[in-house]
Amino acid sequence: QVQLVESGGGLVQAGGSLRLSCAASGRTFTIYNMGWFRQAPGKEREFVTDINWSSGNTYYADSVKGRFTISRDSAKKSVYLQMNSLKPEDTAVYYCAAVDRLRGSSRYTPDYWGQGTQVTVSS
């Protein structure tokens, strides 16, 4: 089966930075895009950002524009999230997600999910 494994979560002060990583493994699939969702306590899981695997085009939620940067390493089947100027409202479990090109899925309904990694931003 497909596995998405995240790393890099942790505790950081407001205004600080953190870098998340996610690597795909297991059954091979053709990546259409990979990206990140997050879920804070009491809130729905929300889309954060993704990157098109072929073109490198990126797409960001308004809440993180100018602060977060997504990138990819195709050879490693990995995606990264550089988070700068972190705010307490960024506190959430962050989930890596991938859309399989053969499934024709939406960026908002990914085909594969990681286990999640906790990001906590203190005031």
Image (spheres, rainbow, N blue to C red):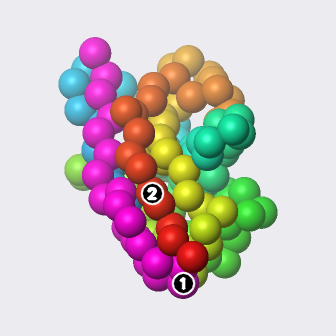
Magenta includes 4? yes
Does label 1 or label 2 sit earlier along the sequence?
1
Quickly name the residue at label 2. Answer: 119
Residue at 49% x, 47% y: name it. Answer: 94
Q: Position of residue 96 (x, y in %)?
A: 45, 42
Q: Assign the magenta stretch its main secondary structure.
A: strand
Taking 91 as reference, is 22 left or right?
left
Taking 28 as reference, is 120 left or right?
right
Magenta includes 78? no
Residue 15: which numbered mark, if any?
1
Taking 17 as reference, is 76 left or right?
left
Q: Tell me the CA gap for discs 1 and 2.
A: 13 Å
| Residue 88 occupies quadrant | bottom right
Residue count near mark 2 (Cα–Cα under 10 Å), binned few <14, some 14–19, many ≥20: many
104 up-or-down from 86: above or below: above
Task: Tell me the quadrant of the picture where the N terminus can be found.
Answer: top left
Q: Secondary structure at mark 1?
A: loop
Q: Is residue 95 visible?
A: yes
| Residue 65 occupies quadrant | bottom right
88 up-or-down from 44: above or below: below
Q: Is residue 31 visible?
A: no
Query: Callout 1, which amino acid?
Result: Gly
Residue count near mark 1 (Cα–Cα under 10 Å), binned few <14, some 14–19, many ≥20: some
Taking 123 as reference, is 7 left or right?
left
Task: Tell me the quadrant of the picture where the C terminus can be found.
Answer: bottom right
Query: Callout 2, which amino acid?
Result: Val
Residue at 44% x, 30% y: name it. Answer: 113
Q: Position of residue 44 (x, y in %)?
A: 70, 35
Residue at 36% x, 25% y: name it. Answer: 29
Q: Position of residue 32 (x, y in %)?
A: 52, 37
Residue range in magenta is 1-19
